[in-house]
Amino acid sequence: MCGRFTLRYSATAFAQQLGLFDVPAFEPRYNIAPTQSIAVIRNHDGQRQAADLHWGLIPSWADDPSIGNRMINARGETVASKPSFRSAFKQRRCLILADGFYEWQKLGKAKQPYYFTLRDGGVFAFAGLWEHWKRDSVTIDSATIITTEANDLLRSIHERMPVILRPEAYQRWLDPKLSDAGELESLLKPYSADEMQSTPVGTWVNSPSHEGARCVQAAE
């Protein structure tokens, strides 16, 4: 799964690669947690845009938006067929901006957090889905992160990892005209372990209420 991640650096240059030139500034965030807002790039009303969405996908048919608390991740193996995600998979895909994520290794009764980044330390994009939910006067746009099996770097820590898309896949993932499930599913693969790195960090990050650079400091 992916339950916590970071976006520490400006994503302006990243967004401009996708033809977005009016991009809001992203404040550095070191401990993004479920139910918080996350920065995404999506197609909406025929336009490509940057947006802040609620993390935890709320299907349009849901009666209670709290269902989103259980929808922070979508398994890549079933995303095309599961009722909660299949409509969004066909029509509402997005890029979720990040530059690192955390996973926890069980060590007896304790859990050791690890911080995973690309070796070059740059911003990247998770494969995501988004939905629009409305009841009466309340509207919520929400998103989920797609996961896949862990690569060799993560496997000893956790069996799953978020899907990190390669830059050459961004256009295809966002293309509203692309609906072939097989072609889309071919993008949902583990990222190369050789191009990633991990760092054990202190337990300060364990609390979702904690923020700041201390979250990514190496464990002593």
Image (spheres, rainbow, N blue to C red):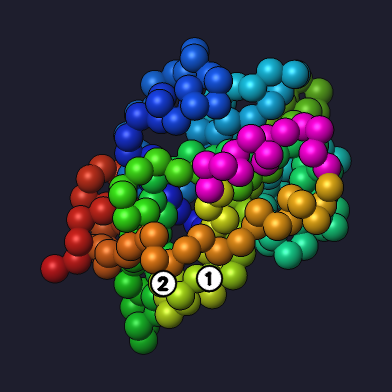
Badge 1 crowding class, 10 Å Cα cut-off, few under 14, some 14 to 19, many 20 or more, is: many
Question: x, y (%) of residue 97?
Answer: 48, 39
Q: Residue at x 77, y 32 (%)?
A: 176
Towards the viewer: 91 or 34: 91
Above or below, comparing residue 195 to residue 88 in the picture: below
Q: Are marks 1 and 2 in contact (CB under 8 Å)?
A: yes
Figure quadrant of the N terminus: bottom right
The verdict on residue 170 being magenta is: yes
> What amino acid does circle 1 point to?
Ala
Question: x, y (%) of residue 58?
Answer: 72, 42
In the figure, residue 202 lies in which quadrant?
Answer: bottom left
> Along the horizontal axis of the image, is 130 left or right of 118?
right
Q: Residue at x 35, y 29 (%)?
A: 10
Residue topped by disc 2: 153
Residue topped by disc 1: 150
Question: x, y (%) of residue 171?
Answer: 64, 35
Towards the viewer: 134 or 44: 44
Towards the viewer: 176 or 136: 176
Span colored in magenta: 166-179
Towards the viewer: 209 or 182: 182
Q: Secondary structure at mark 2?
A: loop
Q: What is the spatial separation of the Cα atoms under label 1 and label 2, in whole angstroms?
A: 8 Å
Q: Secondary structure at mark 1?
A: loop
Q: Residue at x 50, y 56 (%)?
A: 3
